[in-house]
Image: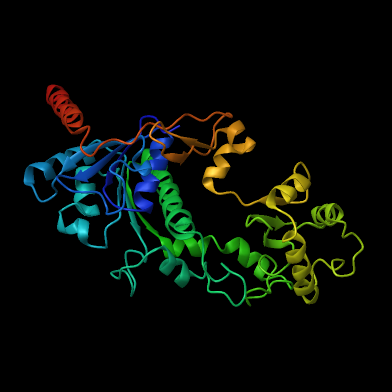
Amino acid sequence: MLNGLRIIEFEGIGPGPFAAMHMADLGADVIVVHRKGGNPTPGMPQAPVIDRGKRSIALDLKDAGDLGTVMALIQTSDGLIEGFRPGVMEKFGLGPEDCHAANPALVYGRMTGWGQDGPMAHMAGHDMNYIGMSGALWYASLPGQPPMAPATLVGDIGGGAQYLTIGMLAGILNARSTGKGTVVDAAMVDGSAHMMNLLMTLHQSSTHQSNRGASLLDGPHWCRTYACSDGGFMSVQSLEPKFYAVFLDLLGLTGDPDFDSQFEPAHWPRATARLEALFAAKPRDHWTALFEGTDACAAPVLSPDEALHHPLSRARGIWHKDADGTLQAAVAPRFDGRTAPPAAPPARGQHTDEILAELQAASRQAGRKE
């Protein structure tokens, strides 16, 4: 879908590289500028999954010749992605004004936690800090327990990478019609707050409260996970009454007074305690079989490795392992019901000679036209 689009990505960690990976998954030519002679982030593999489908060029931004190569790449690109603290790119002479002077239609994507301005713009932080400040972490646990969201998903990926991708594509569409680029300020604190708007819609209803454990989606017995006898877990979210009725019927609880008033908070603690005891009496596979193929909205909680072998994943090819054993998820979303396997991540600097040759050929071609 993004064939013909070129994105320049400056090496970083987390949401910026993820957004670039997503665009590469969808067909864009993504060139990641790796630090010449640099090493990947400690603990990260030499060729991480988030570099899949990209091309790599190794450059030193402090070298005048390499900086010229970067500017030549920018002149041939639709978009740029960087994830440094505000002002760092400007120090290299690669800020938005510099880049737009070379390519007025460039969409300049900036990925940060706190944004390009504001009282916290220059402070360090990570996923949990950003979503803690945005309000998105508030509901991420049961009452009496410290909030804990799935690592990186709400801030880095949901509130960060996906908003940067949307912003980049919107900017590129606008640039193609106007010839004018833009600066995309994608901040994880902004995006994760924006993701709360559906919850805030529920927040305005009479059944939703800001107290943890008393809101429509984090308090009821029909909206949580339950431990099973073998240490596994089942997820239950039977929100609509018709699905809740199926759930109760399968458990033999239809007509039980503890479960009659689905939306009455006073009944939730007692119903929760009973379901905890019920699920704890049998292994996860028992409950999986009971709910499979029904509209009870109850399903097992699988690890990524377990999901790899589930019939759903096998049928849709959601998860797969490479020859080296690397587990990764397939390209998403799908178009016309099809998905293409992602290309392997490159070695650092693998395409340096290839990209330099392309730039030289483009320069010669431009010279002939002049």
Q: Is residue 180 above or below residue 139?
A: above
Identity of the residue furthest to the right in this view: 255
Query: What residue appears at the point 60 percent right and 78 percent down from the top-left corner?
Result: 144
Q: Nearer the viewer, residue 55 or 237?
A: 237
Query: What residue appears at the point 23 percent right and 43 percent down from the top-left corner?
Result: 33
Image coordinates of residue 289 in percent, x first then y, are 75, 44
Give the quadrant of the N terminus. top left
Image coordinates of residue 107 in percent, x first then y, are 32, 46
Identity of the residue furthest to the left in this view: 64
**In-image side of 118 versus 225 (left or right):** left
Query: What residue appears at the point 15 percent right and 53 percent down from the top-left corner?
Result: 93
**Based on the displayed image, in which of its 4 quarters is residue 189 positioned?**
bottom left
Give the quadrant of the C terminus. top left
Q: Is residue 195 above or below residue 49?
A: below
Image coordinates of residue 220 in percent, x first then y, are 73, 67
**In-image side of 96 versus 129 (left or right):** left
Image coordinates of residue 169 in percent, x first then y, are 42, 43
Q: Nearer the viewer, residue 309 or 122?
A: 309
Query: What residue appears at the point 55 percent right and 71 percent down from the top-left corner?
Result: 138
Q: Nearer the viewer, residue 86 or 284?
A: 284
Total numbered labels placed on residues in the image: 0
**Based on the displayed image, in which of its 4 quarters is residue 224 positioned?**
bottom right
Indicate how the structure is coloured in the image.
rainbow
